[in-house]
Image (cartoon, helix red, strand yellow):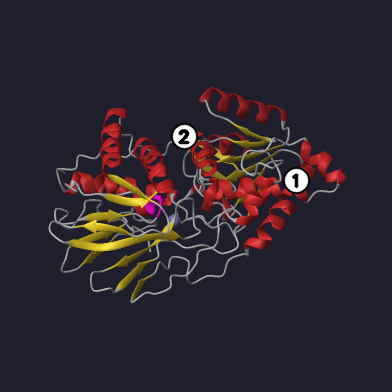
Amino acid sequence: MTGSCHELATKQGKLLIDCGLFQGSEVRPLDIEFDVHDVDALLITHAHIDHIGRLPWLLAAGFNSPIFCTLATANLLPLMLDDALRLQLGMARKGREKVLKLIRTLTVPLHYGTWHTVNGTSDPVADIRFQPAGHILGSAYIEVRLPSEEIIVFSGDLGPSNTPLLPDPKPPRRADILVIESTYGDGVHESVAQRGDRLKALITRSLVNGGVILIPAFSVGRTQELLFDLETIIATQLDDFEKREWSKIPVILDSPMAAKVTEQYRTFKALWGEEAKEKLDSGRHPLAFEQCIVINSHTEHQALINRLKQTGEPAIVVAASGMCNGGRMLNYLEALLPDPRTDVILAGYQAEGTLGREIQNGARAVTIGDNTIEVNAHIHSMSGYSAMQISAIYSNLSRASEKHQNKSASSTAMPKHKKRSRKR
Ligand SMILES: [Zn+2]
């Protein structure tokens, strides 16, 4: 389900598909437990940490072959890994640059829908083709065509269908063997069509009692979908009275990382779904609308929190992390959870052991940093936002990393995990 990493071994060679971190309460060593020297290539389905997070460990183990992915994934890779290595593992800039430089050197970006031959030491290993998976920007399922003409399909994370921002995945025409991701295969989710209505209802209700609406969201996928939905509501779903009320609330994206990723979404407009493209054609800006303000510096961030805390003026704040485990969202929660005017909308799954789960379960007080914080805010939960939840992976990284370091005087020399980060 997580820590996605498959090896395809044939007579001609070996391919690796994804190299991710584990999620949830499972603690596993991060070391690569197989020989990487005869792996001919790494294929990456998408840039979520549970599919790419162990890449630094793969390099440390001696992997030195091409890394194939889509163009957009190639752009997101360094962003995601830099953020992860810095925030969660406290790795210094020089170390991060070294890892990222090597990754950039090995990366071979490919276009969707075109076959590419992966060469082994002597013969070609296979032809590969990336196809849109509709999950996050750049996401793909991968068709692998062996010299025997057999086709093996690796799904990566898929869909869901009917999201407005990305086109639906199109099924492959043929698969002799299908390796399919099944993390959420056992549940029924709030439909994508309804989630906008529910978001509107929640925000409209919150506006009546004033105060800040906090939406914790992970930087890739959910943040952009939320921005997209908010723009749709503001542009098309409000009557005159609502328009006046809503025009008073700024939508604040307080996450430099999410802003950078959103930038990438805008760069790759060609990959958007029809609905999103139509909006662009009609002169609207689904991911950069007028009411949306991006907060970058930490000084701005702190000043904004102080202001919101003192004035209680209304605002919608989208910030990471999605499970309230770290990032700037923590500072908002620390300042605003005691205020009964605050609303928190949990738009994604909250894993066991995270602050998000505690709040969702109705805790009356929570610990943030060294402080006990009273919870008087209104807490709402909604589903229907697709992208996977990643922060929980790193919440377990501390234990995993310690265990890993105790176990071996590791040759990978990964840095110690930093404690729950409060600044972002
Ligand atoms: Zn994913």
Which residues fall within the magenta stretch? 46-50
Task: Name the spot of residue 52 as percent of width and height, x first.
Answer: 34, 50
Magenta residue check for 100: no
Q: Amino acid at mark 2?
A: Arg
Q: Earlier in the sequence, mark 2 or mark 1?
A: 1
Q: Is residue 336 above or below residue 235?
A: above
Percent position of residue 77, x then y: 38, 44
Q: Seen in the image, is 50 located left or right of residue 101?
A: right
SS for tag 1?
helix
- Most common secondary structure along the magenta stretch: loop
* Residue under label 2: 422
Q: Is residue 380 visible?
A: no
Horizontal side of 3 relative to 32 (left or right) equals right
Reply above or below: 6 against 335: below
- Residue 49 in the magenta stretch? The answer is yes
Side (left or right) of 293 relative to 134 = right
Give the residue at mark 1: 235
Q: Residue 34: x percent and y percent?
A: 17, 58
* Residue 120 visible to an observer of this rendering: yes
Tell me which residue sits at (33%, 54%) in the image. 20
- At label 1, which amino acid type do we have? Ala
How crowded pointer 1 is (Cα within 10 Å; few <14, some 14-19, many 20+) is rated as few
